[in-house]
Image (cartoon, rainbow, N blue to C red):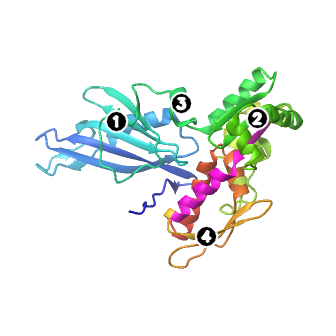
Amino acid sequence: MAEPFVFHFQRGPGGEPEVMYMVDLDCACQVCGHVQYQRFYHSTPFHTLSLDVLDELAERAHLKAGYDCENCGTEVGPDAARRVALTYGFADDAGVIRVFIDRLEETLRYDLQVRRRLDPQAMPVWQPDHEKAAVYDELDEDELEEVFGRPFNIKWAWIDLLEDYLEDPDGGAYSRLSPGLWAVVEHDEESADQLAEEVDEDEFYDALDSGDLAVIPLHDSLPVALATHDHPERISGRLESWLTSALARSFKKEVLWADAYISRKKAIETMERTLTTARLTYTLHETEADVFFSEITTPTGAVYGRGVAVSAVLRRAVHTGLTPGEAARLTAEEIVGILLQLW
């Protein structure tokens, strides 16, 4: 069976991207005891989403309960919700987080699975899967990163790395932020280049040696040629919206330099998979300078009129604090949404 296309994103009220999450509720009528399940597909602002926000969404999810009991007709509300399951899948296919709340036993547990996609048609489950998942009673960023190989939100990882460097600049700073994304921090460009040459990590060295990595300065990462945005300086999640004022001043004073080493391959693979799953055809053209998606076409013959440069997608990832896969998925889904007149 062909994989169904699932939108991870939708356009928010102000044009900003919102990301999908799924809520299941197990409710019992307080008059007759009849049990019914409810499922909701909701979205929340993407760029500000964090593990704490996900917890808050799960804790408030029971408030969505509301229906007339199919057995006795009594109006059923939030107080009838016994169990809650919230499911969130990373847009770059890093994995799926499920939050389970038992309101009768007053327990909260997490289930982290390294699997490629969230399945919106899966049957509701109310307990963690101890065989296939890493299960936690409490969850922090370190545990999440250990399972998925990435933090929940790349923006905070950038901020932590930059602030750590300013506190102790000796030797510069280096970090693998996510699969296909590394950061090198120093006081100037030349020092950052030298530090990158000294990094002793096979994955980084192999990707760099193969020519897969684009090098993009964080402070100069505006995606000026991004096909889905006529005004990239206004793009949601832009650097100015999440970089702290102290860090911004350090860049302006030229005492801080940060380079992102980011994978073209990760972005291309995600773009191709997203467009193909949406049943769109396209032409992939590679030059010495860049890789382009063009002639993106629906089964009915509607054509997206602009080519998409992978370099612009990578700049979007750096500028808005995303992984290469997240930026690619978001850009591809914007194109799908435009062609289907949904975005």
Q: Majority secondary structure of the magenta segment?
A: helix
Mark 1 or mark 4, which is nearer the start of the sequence?
1
Q: Depth check: 158 or 18 in front?
A: 158
Q: Give the residue number, with chain letter if any, for mark 4.
A: 282
Where is residue 54 shown, x and y percent of the image?
A: 46, 37
Query: Label 4: few (<14), some or many (≥20) within 10 Å?
Result: some
Crowding at label 1, few (<14), some or many (≥20) Cα neighbours within 10 Å?
Answer: some
The circle drawn on residue 184 is 2
Let me know if residue 15 appears in the view: no
The amino acid type of the residue labelled 2 equals Val
Queried whether the magenta region covers residue 156, the answer comes back as: no
In percent of width and height, residue 240 lies at 71, 42
Read off the residue under disc 3.
146
Measure how far apart labels 4 and 3 are at the Cα level.
36 Å
Asked if residue 260 is among those painted magenta in the image, a careful observer would answer yes
> To which quarter of the image does residue 141 belong?
top right
